[in-house]
Amino acid sequence: MPGSVRPTHRKGTIMTSLSGITPSGRLTLGNHLGALRRFTDPDGFYFVANLHAMTTKHDPRRLAALTREFATLMLAAGVPEGTVFIQSDVPTHAQLAYLLECTSYVGELSRMIQYKEKGNRPMTRASLFTYPCLMAADILLYGAERVPVGGDQDQHVELARDIAIRFNREYGETFVVPQLNKAALATRVKDLANPTAKMSKSAADDAIGTIRLLDPPDVIRRQIMRAVTDSENEVRHDEANKPGVTNLLDILAACTDGDPVELAKSYASYGALKQDVADAVLAVIDPLQKEYARLTTDPGAIDHLLAQGRDRALDASTPCLQAATRAMGLAGSTP
Ligand code: ADP
Ligand code: TRP
């Protein structure tokens, strides 16, 4: 794409991967299997989207604590060093978001499902309405083509794409147009107590169906052993008729890289399945918790890693912000 701004670190045709995760509650097994675990590109950009956590009423102290916890968990989960940063440390995000607000329409923002569900009331924060512009800025700043997110975010990635295409048409080629998420690669982990709903970090802190990555292992094991199943005793992968058992099989498959339909054949009882799910989940969570504990003994090392991530993100995103600023005709933006 002639003239478009590509971060200077990009190599050949490798597509840049970028994703954010909003510190709006304590991270869950679903967040790990569906998101964190897919943040693997050493040339990628993975951030704690703390600016996104202020679109609804928030407690500043809780936000600060969760932001630090998320960043540490990302590092503990093995997200490559140098790729992890905190969104508000990199001012280009909020700066480009404003420019993009000036190219977006009330009509398209009103159509966002998340806004229709959670907003659209007199006391809704204005930032909930404009949030897709911030998310578009997050993506476009780095020329990201791959955006690993769950299906509920597809509409926002699509909007980022529309905004990029329109901007390029009206103001000249500036942005790399992101690709749409083709297949839902991520496992959809369901709530253990309510297996037709997704497991969510927004659930109450003591919700029994939500596995938190930092919960003690015995609590996690107990939650799995108490997972809702059904009154039969046949282990079969059947989402419509056996959502609880199917969810357990999907979790087992995701944690062991197995096939859920095949796995079902090796179980004669729900109890045995639950035991194996608990073992498999703890085998994933245990090293993560150990690494988290190790990292937290050295806050200076965490600060250092996050500063590295911030500096790299600022370097990579500044040329794009400058190009967009110039393209829109803002005075004083000549480098
Ligand atoms: P939550 O609903 O837990 O607040 P978000 O909507 O903020 O999560 O999503 C953060 C990321 O975590 C998304 O990109 C999504 O892929 C992933 N994610 C969230 N919940 C699940 C789940 N239950 N199963 C799989 N992935 C999930
Ligand atoms: N809005 C996303 C969520 O709630 C998090 C996010 C913010 C994000 N900016 C992003 C994801 C950019 C991908 C790309 O899950």
Image (cartoon, grey):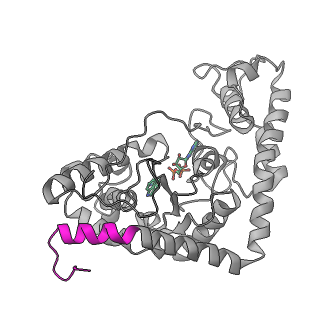
Residue 105: quadrant of the picture: bottom left
* Magenta-colored span: 317-335
* 162 lies above or below 196: below
Instruction: Count up the numbered dots.
Output: 0
Viewer-side residue, 199 vs 203: 199
**Residue shown at the point (20%, 54%) measured from the top left:** 168
Q: State whether residue 47 appears in this view.
A: yes
Residue 187 rendering spot, x and y as whole percentages: 59, 37
Please check the rendered image and state whether residue 327 is part of the magenta-colored stretch, yes or no.
yes
* 297 lies above or below 73: below
**Residue shown at the point (57%, 65%) measured from the top left:** 84
Residue, far bottom: 332
Q: State whether residue 125 appears in this view.
A: no
Please check the rendered image and state whether residue 50 is part of the magenta-colored stretch, yes or no.
no
Residue 119 rendering spot, x and y as whole percentages: 34, 54
Residue, far front: 12
Residue 134 rendering spot, x and y as whole percentages: 35, 62
Residue 44 rendering spot, x and y as whole percentages: 52, 57
Residue 5: quadrant of the picture: bottom left
**Residue shown at the point (19%, 51%) measured from the top left:** 166
Viewer-side residue, 186 vs 190: 186
**Residue shown at the point (55%, 54%) measured from the top left:** 202
Left or right of residue 215: residue 35: left
Left or right of residue 182: residue 279: right
Viewer-side residue, 274 vs 326: 326
Q: Which image quarter is the C terminus in?
A: bottom left
